[in-house]
Image (spheres, grey):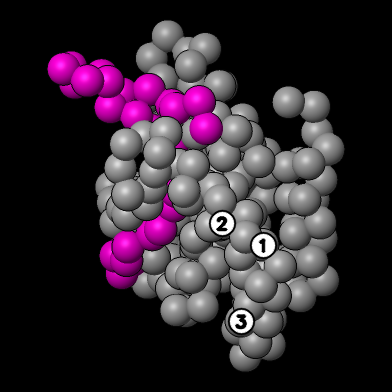
């Protein structure tokens, strides 16, 4: 109950404070990617239920080919996690929380077994200990010979371990600490 109340207040405050940033980022994203600027994707939520997550579009489809690349504006949006700001609406809708395991694509959390399925009891979050540890995940995966295998065998299992640890040790003040660490990583860690 306290967590949900905090999520609503935090989301409303963040949206009021950063609405202009969301609006400008959305417009720039739309211009840069030649789309409506919004990316909607199905992710796995609490209790394994699918939901639609909102993000700002950062991927540009190269004309006359099937290739995709991160757009120029998209690189900036991703660097400061501005592409994630529309997820504050997911939080307001009750589909996500400010702190919790990051929602993944179908085929990962929904397939967990045994004790690891406890993670699905939590609402997915905007930030988590795992997302802090893997804040540069795309660059880590780029350096691997087989990124998909490395992700599935090393990164995902470590995220499960970190999220299960969060499940057992979560608290209001622990969430505040994760939020403060997230702000530090986004704005003060060397890029």
Place residue 137 in its image quadrant: top right
Marks 3 and 1 sit apart, C-alpha to C-alpha, by 15 Å
Q: Position of residue 15 (x, y in %)?
A: 62, 69
- Quick one: label 1, few (<14), some, or many (20+) residues within 10 Å? some
Q: Can residue 191 be seen at all in this image of the molecule?
A: yes
Q: Position of residue 44 (x, y in %)?
A: 35, 60
Residue at image point 48% right, 16% down: 142
**Residue nearest the observer in this picture, 182 or 28:** 28
User: To which residue does mark 3 refer?
Assistant: 8
Q: Mark 1 and mark 3 in contact (Cβ < 8 Å)? A: no
Q: Which of the two discs, 2 and 3, labels the residue nearer the N terminus? A: 3
Q: Write the start and end of the magenta stretch as one range.
A: 48-73
Place residue 147 in its image quadrant: top left
Q: Position of residue 163 (x, y in %)?
A: 58, 55
User: To which residue does mark 1 refer?
Assistant: 18
User: In which quadrant of the rendered image does the C terminus lie?
Assistant: top right
Q: Mark 1 and mark 2 in contact (Cβ < 8 Å)? A: yes
User: To which residue does mark 2 refer?
Assistant: 22
- Say if the magenta span includes residue 50: yes
Q: Which residue occupies the extreme bottom position in the image?
A: 1
Marks 2 and 1 sit apart, C-alpha to C-alpha, by 6 Å
């Amino acid at each position: 109950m306290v967590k949900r109340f905090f999520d609503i207040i935090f989301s409303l405050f963040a949206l009021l404070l950063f609405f202009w940033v969301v609006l400008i980022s959305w417009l720039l994203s739309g211009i840069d990617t030649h789309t409506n600027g919004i990316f909607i994707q199905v992710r796995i939520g609490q209790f394994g239920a699918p939901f639609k997550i909102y993000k700002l579009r950062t991927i540009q489809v190269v004309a006359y080919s099937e290739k995709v690349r991160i757009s120029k504006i998209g690189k900036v949006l991703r660097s400061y996690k501005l592409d994630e700001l529309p997820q504050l609406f997911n939080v307001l809708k009750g589909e996500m929380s400010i702190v919790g395991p990051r929602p993944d694509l179908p085929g990962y959390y929904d397939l967990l077994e045994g004790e690891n399925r406890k993670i699905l009891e939590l609402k997915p979050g905007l930030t988590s200990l795992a997302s802090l540890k893997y804040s540069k995940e795309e660059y880590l995966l780029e350096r691997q010979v087989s990124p998909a295998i490395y992700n599935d065998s090393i990164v995902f299992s470590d995220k499960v371990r970190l999220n299960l640890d969060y499940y057992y040790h979560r608290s209001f003040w622990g969430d505040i600490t994760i939020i403060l660490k997230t702000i530090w990583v986004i704005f003060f860690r060397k890029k």
